[in-house]
Amino acid sequence: MKISSLYLNNFRNIKELSINLDDGINVFYGNNAQGKTNILEAMFMCATGRSQRTRSDKDVISFGEESAQIKMGVKNGSLRDNIDINITGGEKKSIYINSLKISRLGELFGKVNIVFFSPEDLLLIKEGPSYRRRYMDMELCQLSGIYYSNLQRYYRVLKERNALLKKIQTNKKLYQTLDVWDEQLSYYGKKIVKDRKDFVASIGEYSKEIMSELTNEKEVLKPVYRPSANEDEFSEKLKKGRQKDILYGTTSYGVHKDDIVFYINGINSREYASQGQQRSIILALKLSEIKLIEEKTSYEPVLLLDDVLSELDRQRQLYILESITNVQTMITCTGLDEIRECVGNKCKFFYVKEGNIT
């Protein structure tokens, strides 16, 4: 999978931009706050339908403008696809694939798979479970439209159940209707738990090997999936938690409470890992994502490295670049000296200044 071209109009600080991309390494360089990350954000949106930086689509519209547009050309072997996204303030965005408007976001997933790596990924270890659930969901949605569909349906049922719990607080006669929602929540929840369990197991195998190579076999990385309720106990936990759920008006068990723990040599990395160890964990996870996507789809994803190389020592820089020889890569950086030392001139360079490219 490769991104062949990108066009932006009124996207953040970019008035208009049109570029053709190399199948290998593309480097976007320039001072901070010039628009480099915005370019990668647009690519990510075309792959997933969402920004990795904001929950509100209207945030990407340039100040003072009413709408923004992204067009991205994608090639996969002999296949060619054009993805268009139109974003208008106050309205739902419109997504088109080859000029045909899609009705479900799931239709977009898989057109091009993206692995996004930025310094903010350290939050995956440092912050709460919601970051790690989002990590699992984003990767699994790219790999499986069925997973995306099950996840959407689960959260719709969860919303209905939580609304019912609040009504039961003042109308006990509605208690028996919980059975209907519990059955559906359990049905979709079990499927999600299984997929997440398989995903973490696969990522665990790859990342263990990569971490071993990064640390000369000194550190063992083990991601462990911690579901709120296992497949065989999902229904029972929902029933046991009903009184508490009614009291608080929210569902206390389910995949919306899941987590992952990353262990280094048997120790929880969130509590005890150094900054260097945390960077190594994220690096191992990102490179594992590439391997997993290749395994599941038979195609390499596109790798987006947003100001990451400057955060790593030379050993890790070289390890990344040696691991992605067949992967189309987009790199943002402030200076070229470090990049050229690692990869020479075997790149296509784009100088970014005030939202323009030269």
Image (cartoon, rainbow, N blue to C red):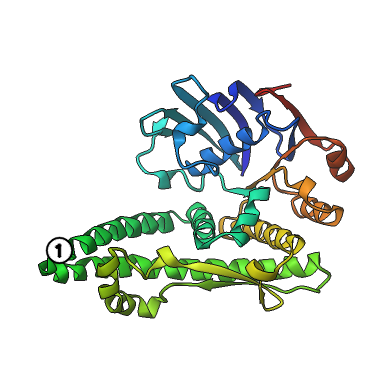
Q: Residues within 10 Å of mark 1 (few under 14, many from 20)?
A: few
Quadrant containing the N terminus in the rendered view: top right
Q: Residue at x 19, y 65 (%)?
A: 169
Q: Nearer the viewer, residue 271 or 286?
A: 271
Q: Quadrant of residue 245?
A: bottom left
- Does 107 sit above or below residue 281? above
Image position, residue 226 (x, y; %): 50, 73
Image position, residue 242 (x, y; %): 26, 73
Give, as a three-letter code, the residue at label 1. Answer: Thr
Q: Residue at x 79, y 36 (%)?
A: 347
Q: Is residue 74 visible?
A: no
Quadrant containing the C terminus in the rendered view: top right
Q: Nearer the viewer, residue 44 or 182?
A: 182
Q: Residue at x 51, y 23 (%)?
A: 63
**Which residue occupies the extreme left position in the image?**
173
Q: Is residue 154 left or right of residue 175?
A: right
- Check disc 1 and report its element: helix, strand or loop: loop
Image position, residue 179 (x, y; %): 20, 71
Q: Which residue position holds label 1? A: 170
Q: Is residue 104 visible?
A: yes
Q: How many discs mark residues in the rendered view?
A: 1
Image position, residue 271 (x, y; %): 64, 69
Q: Is residue 105 left or right of residue 76?
A: left
Q: Quadrant of residue 254?
A: bottom left
